[in-house]
C-alpha cells in the first residue's frame, strides 16, 4: 500500500489523503485504489477519446503527460522524461524485482523459438524458468497467461515477474525493438542475451533499417557488467556489424550431432546454439546430451505427415522468415516439391508484401495467396500487393483463409510439402477490430482426422 506521504515526495506534489494499492496503464483495468498512468497523444483535442475513457475510468490518482480540458481534479502532470523513472520507483515499492536470473533474446526472427528452447534446456538442466513473449507468460510446455504482445508494457512486465517468480530460477524475455526503444525494460539487467537475426521488418514504425538496428542495439544498455550477447555462428555479417559498435558480442558455438527433425532447418539450429550458449553462460554449466528431447514451440515448424507428403505450419510473416522456412524445408525434405500458402498483415510495412511474393515464387512449385490479419485494410488489396511481386500465372487466390487452406490440403499428392505460413500459433484472424476464431493448426488436424491420418 502507498499513501500520500509516500507518493507526495515521489511525485513532487502536495497530495490529499489517499491510499494506492496498485499501478495501471489501461483505464479498463484501473479501480478506485489505483494509480493510473495515461499518455495523451499530441493531437488529442477537447472532444477526444481521453474524455470518453477518463469519464468511465476509476482511479485514486491519475498521472498525465500533458494538460487537457477534461483533466479531473485528482490528477497531476509529469514530463515525458520523468515518466519511466517515476513508474520504476512506484513499481519498486509495490512489485520489487525478484531474485531471478534475467535473460533476453532479440532479433527480427527466432525470438519465440529461442526463448522456448531456453526454457526447455533450463528444465533439462534442473533449472526452472518462465518466458515472457509472443506466446504469453509460459513455463516449460505450459502457458500461464496470454497478453497479446511480443513484449508487455513496463508496468505489466514488472507485475508478471513478481506474480510468477515463485519456485523459478530465471526468466527469458523476448526483447522486441518496440520494447527497447519505448523503455519497457527500464531497470532490468540481463545476465546473458542473444541476437538471432536482422532483416527487414517493422519499417512502418522505425522508418529505416538504420533506426531499426539502433533500436536493437539498446539491448546492450540492459546487460549486466559481466554479461555477453551471443549471435549465431551463421550470422557473421550481423556479428561484424555489432562488433563495430561494441566488443560485448560473441559467436555462439556450433552444435554438431543428431538432432530432432525440427532442427533440420539451419535457422532453428542457429536458435538452438544461442539458447544453449545463454543457458550455459547464465548458470555456468555444460548442457548434457539432452538435445534429442527438445520439441518445437507452438506454431514453429509444426510438422505433420500425410501419406508421402508433409504439412508445415509456421509463424513466418516477414521476408527473411519466409525465405528461412522455405530454405529449411528444402533442406529437410530434399526429395519433395514445395507448395506455399501465405498472406500479409494489414496496417504494417507494405513494402514487404511484394518481396514475400517474390520469395514464394523463387522456392515454391505452387503458391496460394490468402488473408492473414487484414486489420483495417481491404484484404483484396493486400493480396494485390503480394501478387505485384509474382511474375508467374496460375496463382491460387482466395481471401477466405479457411477455404484456401482446405483447397491446398485437398490438392496434396505424392511427395509434396505444403507450408502454411504467417499464422503459426495464432487462433484468430483480426479484421475491422474483430478477432474471428481461426487456426491453421486446427484446420490441419481436422483435415488429417477426416482423412484417417
Image (cartoon, rainbow, N blue to C red):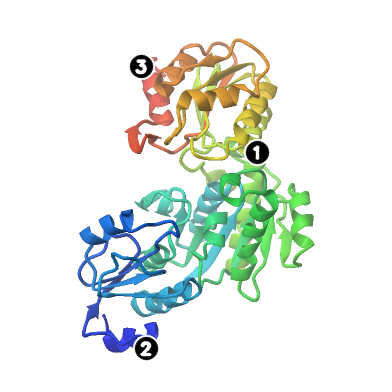
Q: Quadrant of residue 406?
A: top left
Q: Nearer the viewer, residue 245 or 410?
A: 245
Task: Name the side, left or right, on which 239 lies relative to 168.
Answer: right
Which element is circle 2 on? helix
Q: Nearer the viewer, residue 397 or 137?
A: 397
Residue with the mark numbered 2: 9
Q: Quadrant of the N terminus?
A: bottom left
Which element is circle 3 on? helix
Local crowd at mark 2 within 10 Å, few (<14), some, or many (≥20)?
few
The answer, for residue 288, to whether it is visible in the render is no
Residue at x 55% of width, y 36% of height: 317
> Which label lies toward us, 3 or 1?
1
Q: Is 21 located above or below residue 406 in the figure?
A: below
The answer, for residue 378, to whether it is visible in the render is yes
Residue with the mark numbered 1: 320
Q: Are marks 3 and 2 in contact (CB under 8 Å)?
A: no
Q: What percent of the width, then of the height, locates residue 105? A: 58, 57
Residue with the mark numbered 3: 450
> Which label lies toward us, 3 or 2?
2
Task: Name the side, left or right, on which 232 lies relative to 439.
Answer: right
Residue at x 51% of width, y 41% of height: 296
- Dot placed on the residue nearer the N-terminal end, 3 or 2: 2
Residue at x 22% of width, y 60% of height: 55
Mark 3 and mark 2: Cα distance apart in space = 66 Å
- Dot placed on the residue nearer the N-terminal end, 3 or 1: 1
Local crowd at mark 1 within 10 Å, few (<14), some, or many (≥20)?
many
Q: Quadrant of the C terminus?
A: top left
Mark 3 and mark 1: Cα distance apart in space = 34 Å
Q: Are marks 3 and 1 in contact (CB under 8 Å)?
A: no
Amino acid at each position: 500500500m502507498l499513501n500520500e506521504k509516500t507518493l507526495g515526495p515521489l511525485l513532487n506534489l502536495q497530495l490529499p489523503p489517499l491510499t494506492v494499492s496498485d499501478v495501471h496503464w489501461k483505464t479498463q483495468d484501473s479501480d478506485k485504489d489505483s494509480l493510473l498512468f495515461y499518455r495523451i497523444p499530441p493531437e488529442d483535442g477537447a472532444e477526444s477519446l481521453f474524455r470518453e475513457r477518463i469519464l468511465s475510468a476509476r482511479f485514486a490518482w491519475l498521472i498525465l503527460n500533458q494538460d487537457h480540458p477534461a483533466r479531473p481534479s485528482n490528477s497531476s502532470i509529469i514530463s515525458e522524461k520523468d515518466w519511466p523513472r517515476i513508474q520504476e520507483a512506484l513499481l519498486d515499492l509495490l512489485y520489487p524485482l525478484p531474485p531471478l536470473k534475467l535473460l533476453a533474446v532479440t532479433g527480427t526472427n527466432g525470438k519465440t523459438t529461442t526463448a522456448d528452447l531456453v526454457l526447455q534446456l533450463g528444465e533439462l538442466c534442473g533449472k526452472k524458468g518462465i518466458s515472457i513473449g509472443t506466446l504469453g507468460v509460459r513455463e516449460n510446455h505450459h502457458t500461464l497467461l496470454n497478453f497479446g504482445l511480443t513484449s508487455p508494457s513496463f508496468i505489466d512486465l514488472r507485475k508478471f515477474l513478481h506474480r510468477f517468480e515463485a519456485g523459478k530460477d530465471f526468466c527469458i524475455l523476448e526483447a522486441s525493438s518496440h520494447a527497447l526503444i519505448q523503455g519497457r525494460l527500464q531497470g532490468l539487467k540481463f545476465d546473458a542475451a542473444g541476437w538471432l537475426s536482422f532483416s527487414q521488418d517493422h519499417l512502418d514504425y522505425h522508418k529505416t533499417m538504420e533506426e531499426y538496428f539502433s533500436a536493437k542495439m539498446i539491448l546492450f544498455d540492459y546487460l549486466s557488467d559481466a554479461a555477453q550477447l551471443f549471435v549465431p555462428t551463421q550470422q557473421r555479417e550481423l556479428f561484424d556489424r555489432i562488433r563495430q559498435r561494441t566488443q560485448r558480442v560473441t559467436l555462439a558455438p556450433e552444435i554438431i550431432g543428431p538432432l530432432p527433425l525440427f532442427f533440420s532447418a539451419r535457422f532453428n539450429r542457429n536458435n538452438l546454439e544461442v539458447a544453449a550458449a545463454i543457458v550455459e553462460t547464465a548458470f555456468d554449466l555444460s548442457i548434457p546430451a539432452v538435445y534429442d528431447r527438445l520439441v518445437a514451440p507452438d506454431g514453429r515448424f509444426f510438422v505433420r505427415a500425410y501419406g508421402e507428403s508433409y504439412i508445415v505450419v509456421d509463424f513466418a510473416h516477414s521476408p527473411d522468415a519466409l525465405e528461412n522456412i522455405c530454405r529449411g524445408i528444402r533442406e529437410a525434405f530434399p526429395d519433395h516439391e514445395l507448395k506455399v500458402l501465405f498472406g500479409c498483415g494489414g496496417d504494417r510495412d507494405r513494402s514487404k508484401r511484394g518481396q514475400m511474393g517474390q520469395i514464394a515464387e523463387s522456392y515454391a512449385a505452387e503458391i496460394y495467396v490468402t488473408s492473414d490479419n487484414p486489420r483495417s485494410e481491404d484484404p483484396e488489396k493486400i493480396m494485390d500487393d503480394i501478387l505485384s511481386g509474382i511474375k508467374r500465372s496460375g496463382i491460387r487466390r482466395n481471401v477466405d483463409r479457411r477455404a484456401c487452406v482446405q483447397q491446398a490440403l485437398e490438392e496434396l499428392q505424392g511427395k509434396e510439402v505444403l507450408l502454411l505460413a504467417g499464422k503459426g500459433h495464432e487462433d484468430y484472424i483480426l479484421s475491422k477490430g474483430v478477432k474471428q476464431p481461426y487456426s491453421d493448426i486446427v484446420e490441419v488436424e481436422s483435415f488429417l482426422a477426416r482423412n484417417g491420418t
